[in-house]
Image: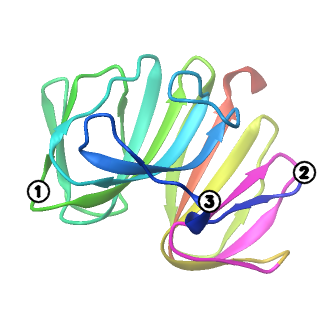
Amino acid sequence: MALQVLRAQERTPAPWKNGGGVTSEVAVRPEGAGTGDFVWRVSVADVAQSGPFSAFEGVDRIITVVDGPGMELTVDGVPHVMTDPYEPFTFSGDSDTMCELLGGPIVDFNVMVRRADATARVRIVRDRVAVRPEAGTCVLAVVLQGSVTLGREPHRLSHLDAVLLAEGDADDIDVDGVLALVTVTDRDSG
């Protein structure tokens, strides 16, 4: 399978239902799935104001502040202050979650996965990395800051561009900035 390059400028931003921000979908599986039927979904959001998060039953979430002064997420009554960029935070989409912005708008990186179907993890990388997805696994690499170069077929990716690699794909990525590696593993692949 050929790796898939996903350019930031090709995304169409969509407003949130509550009007508190705008989201741009980086990738979703199955392709074309909506918020009610995805197995996994990765997006970048511009968060303009404080407010509640939408509930996603049966979904695990990983959120990372990319830009801005940060936020405090209160998940089922427990506060979590997120002021440092590039520090992934995992929580249940079933939880009652409230976001309080800490001094202004932010940009966040959001991974959602249906826990019955798959698991996900986010690793932040600032150096060269070899990406070789195993059976039942795919890896989405998203440039959070700076740029990266894919080694095998020279592709240069800029801010918020991404590349999706599946089983059989392999590449070395030279990072000049900050890269998020999202590894999604099917539950039935083990």
Could you tell me residue 165's position as x and y percent?
76, 53
Could you tell me residue 75's position as x and y percent?
21, 30
Tell me if 132 is positioned left or right of 67 in this view. Answer: right
Q: Amino acid at mark 2?
A: Met
Decide which of tag 1 and tag 2 comes sooner along the chain: 2
Q: Please report contact status of discs 3 and 2: CB closer than 8 Å, yes or no.
A: no
Q: CA distance from mark 3 to mark 1?
A: 28 Å
Tell me if 123 is positioned left or right of 156 in this view. Answer: left
Q: Choose top left, top right, bottom left or bottom right for residue 61.
A: top left
Decide which of tag 3 and tag 1 comes sooner along the chain: 1
Q: Amino acid at mark 1?
A: Leu
Secondary structure type for disc 1: loop
Q: Kindly identify which residue carries mark 3.
A: 141
Which residue is painted at 16% across and 38% down in the image? 51
Residue range of the region highlighted in magenta in the rendering: 154-175
Decide: few, some or many residues near mark 3? Use Cα within 10 Å; few <14, some 14-19, many ≥20: many
Decide: few, some or many residues near mark 1? Use Cα within 10 Å; few <14, some 14-19, many ≥20: some
Residue 102: assigned label: 1
Secondary structure type for disc 2: loop
In the displayed structure, would residue 91 be above or below residue 57?
below
Which residue is painted at 56% across and 79% down in the image? 147
Secondary structure type for disc 3: strand
Q: Kindly identify which residue carries mark 2.
A: 1
In the displayed structure, would residue 33 be above or below residue 5?
above
Could you tell me residue 89's position as x and y percent?
34, 44
Residue 144: assigned label: none
